[in-house]
């Protein structure tokens, strides 16, 4: 009979088994003892290629791969407003090699919308690593749409309550939430048309099948510059550097209106602090690189370096904000 000790078995076990066998404290101790990174780093993205989360992740991953961390891979695991990827992150080994880039849609809005069926809790299951960047949204229309300003759009909607459609990349996405906030503050009614992603909505907007939507500025920058879409206003506090002639929603008649899509790098909650700090330091170096900043600027993205604790605070604040908006607008989860 083989006499194999428990210690020997644990030494041969993969990290996932280690976490289940040793529990949270043991998994943390095991991760601390391993060299970092023990394998190529994988960054989960909860949305399809081409969207804001994916674009930001690939730019940052490429830059990180040039440094001491070695290859950083991007893994798109789509579905349920990013919650499928978030659940994978929560269950991953806390050794710093499985990360996720997420925004308020996945960590703040979706858990509120799907509270009865979702077990994921951002405050309980993940820890912030670093904020990567932020992008304003833009209120954008087909060039044939008669309204040329925010005020003209509001006047049209007031004259035809509920008749005008406003699209989004899906229920609970940041563009959807921005639209609900806009309708509330403007005191108007429009019909929300959710799509399965921002790209399909933009296709219909380009074809004239959809009149208006809020979109991530980073996604429609090319269309705005070519004139295939027309922007009415951006949602940031200040005008976007790449579009100085495009007013903000706040200065267009809704003072105080401000919405941005942020992108934060996160890890499983049990990840050792020294690994989180190491990752944060490498992200800060990447965000400071001139070529990355140039690429961000081309897409109307702003690098937003910060501490892990600052990202945790942002997530907490966004959860409270999401609860307020969802409750006020009576938003229901998509079927």
Image (cartoon, rainbow, N blue to C red):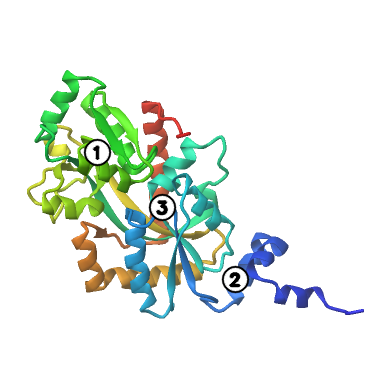
What residue sits right under mark 2 in the picture?
A: 31
Residues 265 and 59: in front is: 59
Number of numbered callouts drawn? 3
Q: What residue lies at 66% left-to-right and 71% top-to-bottom?
A: 14
Please, is residue 203 above or below residue 171 in the view? below
Q: Quadrant of residue 303?
A: bottom left
| Precedes in sequence: disc 1 or disc 3 | 3
What kind of element bears circle 1? strand
Q: Nearer the viewer, mark 3 or mark 2?
A: 3
Residue farthest to the right, as pictured: 1
What kind of element bears circle 2? helix
Q: Nearer the viewer, mark 2 or mark 1?
A: 1
Q: What residue lies at 43% left-to-right and 79% top-to-bottom?
A: 70
Q: Position of residue 270 (x, y in %)?
A: 57, 61
Residues 181 and 167: in front is: 167
- Badges 2 and 1: C-beta atoms under 8 Å apart? no
What residue sits right under mark 1 in the picture?
A: 213
Residues 142 and 182: in front is: 142
The disc label shown at residue 47, or none: 3
Q: What residue lies at 54% left-to-right and 64% top-to-bottom?
A: 271
| Precedes in sequence: disc 2 or disc 1 | 2
The answer for how far apart the CA atoms under marks 2 and 1 are is 45 Å
Q: Position of residue 334 (x, y in %)?
A: 45, 34
């Amino acid at each position: 009979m083989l006499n194999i000790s428990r210690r020997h078995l644990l030494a041969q076990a993969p990290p996932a088994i280690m976490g289940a066998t040793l529990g949270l404290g043991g998994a943390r101790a095991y991760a601390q003892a391993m060299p970092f990174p023990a394998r190529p780093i994988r960054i989960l993205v909860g949305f399809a290629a081409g969207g804001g989360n994916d674009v930001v992740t690939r730019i940052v991953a490429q830059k990180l791969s040039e440094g001491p961390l070695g290859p950083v891979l991007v893994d798109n695991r789509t579905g349920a407003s990013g919650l499928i990827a978030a659940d994978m992150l929560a269950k991953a080994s806390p050794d710093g090699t499985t990360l996720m880039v997420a925004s308020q849609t996945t960590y703040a809005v979706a858990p509120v919308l799907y509270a009865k069926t979702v077990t994921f809790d951002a405050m309980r299951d993940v820890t912030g690593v670093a904020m990567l960047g932020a992008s304003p949204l833009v209120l954008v229309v087909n060039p044939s749409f008669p309204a040329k300003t925010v005020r003209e759009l509001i006047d049209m909607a007031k004259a035809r309550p509920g008749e005008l459609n406003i699209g989004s990349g899906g229920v609970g996405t940041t563009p959807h939430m921005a639209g609900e906030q806009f309708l509330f503050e403007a005191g108007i009614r429009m019909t929300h048309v959710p799509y399965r992603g921002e790209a399909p909505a933009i296709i219909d907007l380009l074809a004239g099948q959809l009149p208006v939507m809020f979109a991530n500025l980073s996604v429609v920058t090319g269309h705005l510059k070519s004139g295939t879409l027309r922007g009415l206003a951006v949602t940031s506090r200040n005008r976007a550097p790449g579009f100085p002639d495009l007013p903000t929603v706040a200065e267009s008649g809704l003072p105080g209106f401000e919405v941005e899509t942020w992108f934060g790098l996160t890890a499983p909650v049990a990840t050792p602090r020294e690994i989180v700090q190491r990752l944060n330091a490498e992200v800060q170096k990447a965000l400071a690189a001139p070529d990355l900043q140039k690429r961000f600027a081309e897409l109307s993205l702003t690098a937003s370096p910060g501490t892990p604790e600052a990202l945790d605070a942002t997530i907490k604040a966004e959860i409270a904000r999401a609860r307020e908006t969802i409750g006020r607008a009576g938003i229901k989860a998509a079927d």
